[in-house]
Image (spheres, rainbow, N blue to C red):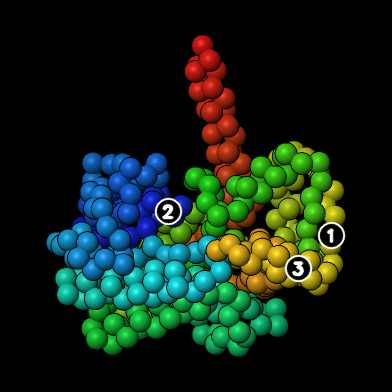
Amino acid sequence: MKIFLTGATGFIGSKLALYLAAKNHQINALVRDLQSKNLPIHENIISFKGDIGDPDSIKKAIEGCEYVIHMAAFTDIRYRHIDRFYQVNVQGTSNVLSAAMEAQVKKFIFTSSISVFGDALSGVPITEKQPRMNAYHNDYELTKVMAEELVKEYCKKGLNCTILNVGRVYGPGFSTYSNGINKLFEIIEKYKCMISPDKLNTKASYVYIDDVIAAHELGLKFEDSGEKFIIGGENASYERLFHLIFKISGTEKKVFKIDYEFLKILGKIHSFFSRSGDYQSSLSPEILDFLFTERAASSQKAQKILGYRYTGLEEGLQKTSEFIKNIRHETTLLHIDNRS
């Protein structure tokens, strides 16, 4: 396969590019910075300098490709303004769809999020058929829904599209804002105690990164058009997540719980006094609601139709912990070598 890929320097995209390249597929990766430290390097990966906001750079990179995986998105929900979300997530997606249609590709995979469905209703896991019943928590959710609508429009025009709604991704890889599990391991090891909102029973679907990679490969092989698949993992509460990380880390920390509504009031006050910047506090009410919204989800459709399988949370966290330890060990050895 010759595959056009956006988002190749992201947490998921870089690993996906290397995985597909190792399977002897040619990857045409559109990247903004050819000097990025996260740029995947492989003889089967050709990097094109460009941006999904630039239609000409897309057309150049997509030339000759039979498949498209559109993974690039602006995800930092701390950003205060909708303009950047719209330019990347909506207009950028429109540009990639248009180029894919013109190139007459065989398959278009759009990587989306479980968050577009809103809250899990009445404790029932989210499915592909669930309608959104609540307001958008942030501009990221809104613009990803708008992007999905564009994908559906192009399906009607004849472009073979599949949408993958991915859960909360974690696992080995470089640290990003959206890859919070790695940071959580570091916090637990560094501090004697933890402070958390008291909604530790809130559940989300945690999906191991290798399972997300495998799901995209399955999606490329899926022939039908217009389908959405939830790509999730084990549904777990923060309480279970903390318990497993404590267990794997070999430590037990005291978790001090703060009333959720009180914390939101503090977040509003902090946000009010920091309105001048482009980024809001991580304790803003909008971000707290995004993080502490029920996101339990079912991947049964993907399992039944695509043959998707996912890794249990404890196994995935164990692999993540081993990766972090190996990185720390290699960094220590490098530091010693430099001192020598």
Q: Is residue 313 visible?
A: yes
- Where is residue 249 drawn, in percent x and y? 71, 40
Q: Residue furthest front?
A: 276
Mark 2 or 3: in front is: 3
330 or 206: nearer the viewer = 330
Q: Residue at 85% across / 48% down in the picture?
A: 254
320 or 284: nearer the viewer = 284
Mark 2 → mark 3, Cα distance in angstroms:
33 Å
Mark 1 or 3: in front is: 3
- Where is residue 268 drawn, in percent x and y? 73, 70
Residue under numbered circle 3: 269
In the rendered structure, which amino acid carries the disc numbered 2?
Answer: Gly
Q: Residue at 35% across / 75% down in the picture?
A: 91
Tag 1, which secondary structure?
Answer: strand
Tag 2, which secondary structure?
Answer: loop
Among the 4 quarters of the image, the one containing residue 7: bottom left
Residue under numbered circle 2: 10
Among the 4 quarters of the image, the one containing residue 104: bottom left
| Number of dots carrying numbers | 3
In the rendered structure, which amino acid carries the disc numbered 3?
Answer: Ile
If you read the primary sequence from the N terminus, does the residue marked by circle 2 or circle 3 appear first? Answer: 2
Report whether 131 appears left or right of 91: right
- Where is residue 230 drawn, in percent x and y? 49, 72
Question: If the image is split into quadrants, where does the N terminus sit?
Answer: bottom left
Report whether 328 appears left or right of 165: right
Residue 257 is marked as 1
Tag 3, which secondary structure?
Answer: helix
Q: Residue furthest top?
A: 340
Mark 1 → mark 3, Cα distance in angstroms:
20 Å
If you read the primary sequence from the N terminus, does the residue marked by circle 1 or circle 3 appear first? Answer: 1
- Where is residue 243 drawn, in percent x and y? 75, 52
Q: Is residue 296 visible?
A: no
